[in-house]
Amino acid sequence: MTTLLTALALMLVLEGILPFLSPDTLRRVMQQMAGMNNRSLRLSGLFSMLAGLLLLYLVR
C-alpha cells in the first residue's frame, strides 16, 4: 500500500510541474487537445500507458 501511495504522490508532483512552471503553455496544449478527434486522443493515451508499463517493467 505504501508503494501505491508513493507512486500516486509522485504522479501528482509530476502532473503539477507544467501548470506551475508555464500555465500559458498548459492552456495552449489543452486548447490543441480540445480540437483533436477522439481517435487521436485515445491513441496518445494508449501510447502513454504502454510507455509507462514498459518503464515499470524495466525498473521492476
Image: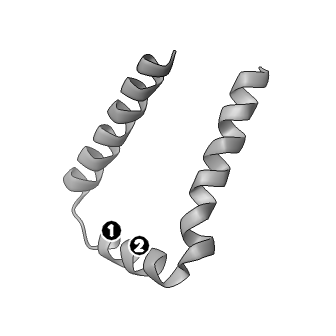
**Image quadrant where residue 58 sits:** top left
What residue appears at the point 59 percent right and 53 percent down from the top-left corner? Answer: 14
**Residue 20: image x %, image y %?**
63, 73
- Label 1 near label 2: C-beta < 8 Å? yes
Relative to 16, residue 6 above or below = above
**Image quadrant where residue 23 sits:** bottom right
Q: Which residue is mark 2?
A: 30
Q: Which residue is farthest right? A: 2
| Element carrying mark 1 | helix
Q: Which residue is farthest bottom? A: 24
Question: Where does the N terminus fall, quadrant-wise?
Answer: top right
* Label total for image: 2
Q: Quick one: 46 or 51, which is closer to the camera?
A: 51
Q: Amino acid at mark 2?
A: Met
What residue appears at the point 47 percent right and 24 percent down from the top-left corner? Answer: 56
Q: Which residue is mark 1?
A: 33
What residue appears at the point 21 percent right and 54 percent down from the top-left corner? Answer: 40
Marks 2/1: CA–CA distance: 5 Å
| Element carrying mark 2 | helix
Q: Amino acid at mark 1?
A: Met
